[in-house]
Image (spheres, helix red, strand yellow):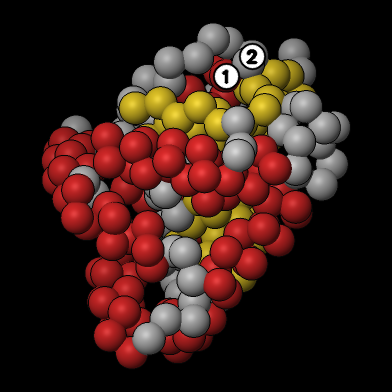
Amino acid sequence: MKDTHTREARTNTQARQMEGRMARWYARQRASAAQLAETREFAARLTGVLPRGADILEVAPGPGYLAVEMARLGYRVSGLDSSHSFVEIASENARKAGADVTFHHGDAAELPFGDETFDLVVCAAAFKNFGRPLDALNEMHRVLRPGATAFINDMNRASSPEDIDEEVRRMGLNAVNSFMTKVPLVWLRRRAYSPALFRRLAAQSAFRTCEIQTEGISLNIVLTKHEE
């Protein structure tokens, strides 16, 4: 119980921090040419097996770049974020891109969507911040259609300092922003999941099992809602 309360308190603190000026700074750092190109490639890989027009939910989309790219590929995309600023920023980015995406403010542990609504749920670089991770997984399971999957990409606690250096280098940032990005990554690694920890969490959830691949500083996690 103590660990749960501690995680929730940290999550509430971070949600408050990711508002206003900090949210706008983060959005700018994620908008480098290299990162936007990587986001387009990521969107194509995520949706490769889905039919056009499928329903996708991105949980914690931040500035919304991934959601926008998935919408551009012909999917019906919704996003939900705990930051009011990110909802505003993402909505503006979608409008500028001419992408039809609806962004909602809310809690990943209490999704405001009906049962069996989505063909894919995506959560990138945010799951480690959730105060109620088991509830968040169960909510993802609830809103997925039978046979559909949730894909979670997040930091690997087992990543090395060299892995973090390489990740920051690939972002194409200047020296100051590279430093300002690296420092929180080093700090965030301590609250990230290892493959073993995430498998343990998934086993307690409605998904029961998961598939995990490691890549650089990342965990790529697939959870399937099996048909009953």
Secondary structure under tag 1 reads helix
Q: Which of these two is toward me, 84 or 8?
A: 84
Quadrant in which the C terminus appears = top right
Alpha carbon of mark 2 to alpha carbon of mark 1: how far? Answer: 5 Å
Query: x and y percent of residue 154 in the render?
Result: 48, 56
Q: Could one spot residue 40 in this view of the protein?
A: yes
Residue under label 2, please give it. Answer: 116
Callout 2 touching callout 1 (CB < 8 Å): yes
Q: What's the residue at 40%, 26% (across, down)?
A: 104
Q: In the picture provided, is 145 more to the left or to the right than 15?
A: right
Q: Nearer the viewer, residue 176 or 225?
A: 176
Residue 146: quarter of image: top right
Identity of the amino acid at label 2? Glu
Structural crowding at the residue carrying mark 2, measured as other residues with C-alpha within 10 Å and reported as few (<14), some (14–19) or many (≥20): some
Residue found at the far top of this picture: 114
The residue nearer to you, when weighing 39 against 221, is 39
Alpha-carbon neighbours of circle 1 within 10 Å: few (<14), some, or many (≥20)? many
Q: Label 1 amino acid?
A: Val
Res 211 visible: no
Element at label 2: loop
> Is 198 drawn above or below residue 40 in the view shown?
above
Image quarter hosting the N terminus: top left
Query: Which residue in the structure is indicated by mark 1?
Result: 143
